[in-house]
Image (cartoon, grey):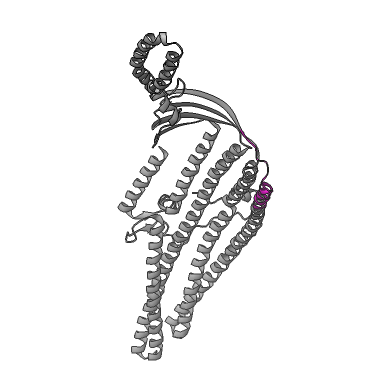
Amino acid sequence: MKKVLILIQLCILTLAIKAQGVLSLDSCRALALNNNKDLLISNEKINAAHYQRKAAFTNYLPNFSATGAYMRNQKEFSLLSADQKAALSGLGTNLSGPIQQVANNIVAAHPELAPLIASLSGKIGAALPALDEVGNSIVDAFRTDTRNVYAGALTLTQPLFMGGKIRAYNKITRYAEELAQQQHQAGKQEVIMSTDQAYWQVISLVNKQRLAKSYLQLLQQLDSDVEKMISEGVATKADGLSVRVKVNEAEMTLTKVEDGLSLARMLLCQLCGIDLSTPIRLADEDMKDIPLLNAETGFDMSTAYANRPEIRSLELASKIYQQKVNVTRSEHLPSIALMGNYMVTNPSVFNSFENKFKGMWNIGVMVQVPIWHWGEGIYKTKAAKAEARIAEYQLQDAKEKIELQVNQAAFKVNEAGKKLVMANKNMEKAEENLRYATLGFKEGVIATSNVLEAQTAWLSAQSEKIDAQIDVKLTEIYLKKSLGTLKE
């Protein structure tokens, strides 16, 4: 819902720009924040880290998996040997010889039993093929028919103790999500600062364009006056040429300023995601004197550390490396898991070999204990601790550099304020000097060269004043950026 509202606001703002072509500083910031590709990428990194954290939490929960398999065997498993199969298949045939031998021995010993033995031999001979069939049926009964084998299993795994690995991974992913958010915030501050720089650069060039036009008008008026004086014989052609040279220089300066202004507008359009050819105007372009706020140069470094996303990012990185130590250590600690399975096979072996799907369940506990790895775990843990200490040193180094950056920014704010005061004083003197020079020139008591010098000094003072005003604005932005208080 929030994304939809932001999109609607962006569409409304874009339509307003197309209708009026006027942009305020806040609208430039809003457009830049919504159109910056790096911010869009970092926002997706936040989403990825969020889902990775959710995925890490699932390691606490039972894991279910299903497995199925089919296998075609070239040969089937046999419970009987080839000799046993042959003996059973020819059971009757194999018995005929021994039975005949026994009958002959009986007849030899008791001739009077010869008729009875002959009768029994005939009956037994008729029964022998039936014995062959019985033997074949026994062989068939012992067949396993395992050439086509089907198997399936449903497995449950519940981690009970993994050496602290699961808990450490959950902390790492939580820190990683917050780290992505802090990096996104740092990116937003960079975009805001770049947008403000481009915005005030345009304002600076607009004022310099206005100044260049005013200076050109002064020179053109002077050129006209000198031409009249030459025609009356009170000025020389050399005076006229000097003024025309200054006019040409002023025209060239105006052209350069206009070109620079066009490029600065294009840069601002690019930052705001607007087509480069779109004609835009800024809300502060008509201000002759840029309104300035008194920058508060007092600061508390603990507050700056708390506000700077870079410091928070390094703190999170340090915590991540500390958890990586726990992960490395856990790889060499015992792990315990509860295991449960339900398995089915075809052929089944629970009632001899049947071509039916039958199964069974089992449950147990699996324990894995590393015994000896030649010190690998100790070495890896020490390496992880070294990386954690590196992250700590980087954090300390960043705090020292930020402290220096804040002090430098505060110094530049004070310096810019002093320069602006001096520029205003110089501007007053230059305007007074130009007024006297113009009046003296009209009275004929001041030479053309002196008027040109006064006009050049006035131009320089005006330009320095504009630069000082913009410098104050930019140094305020830099100070807020260094303090971490630059917000949208």
Q: Is residue 470 left or right of residue 141?
A: right
Residue 108 location in percent, x, y? 44, 15
Residue 443, above or below 257? below
Of residues 161 and 308, the one nearer the viewer is 161
The reply to whether the magenta stretch includes residue 210 is no
**Residue 355 in view (yes/no):** no
Q: Quadrant of residue 130?
A: top left
* Residue extent of the magenta highlight: 367-387
- Residue 172's quadrant in the figure? top right
Expressed as whole percent of the image width and height from the top left, the position of residue 353 reads 43, 24
Please say if 152 is above or below 298.
above
For the point 55% across and 55% down, the residue is 481
Name the residue at 58% across, 52% down.
310
x then y, percent, for residue 105: 45, 16
- The image quadrant of residue 370 is top right
Q: Is residue 438 left or right of residue 318?
A: left
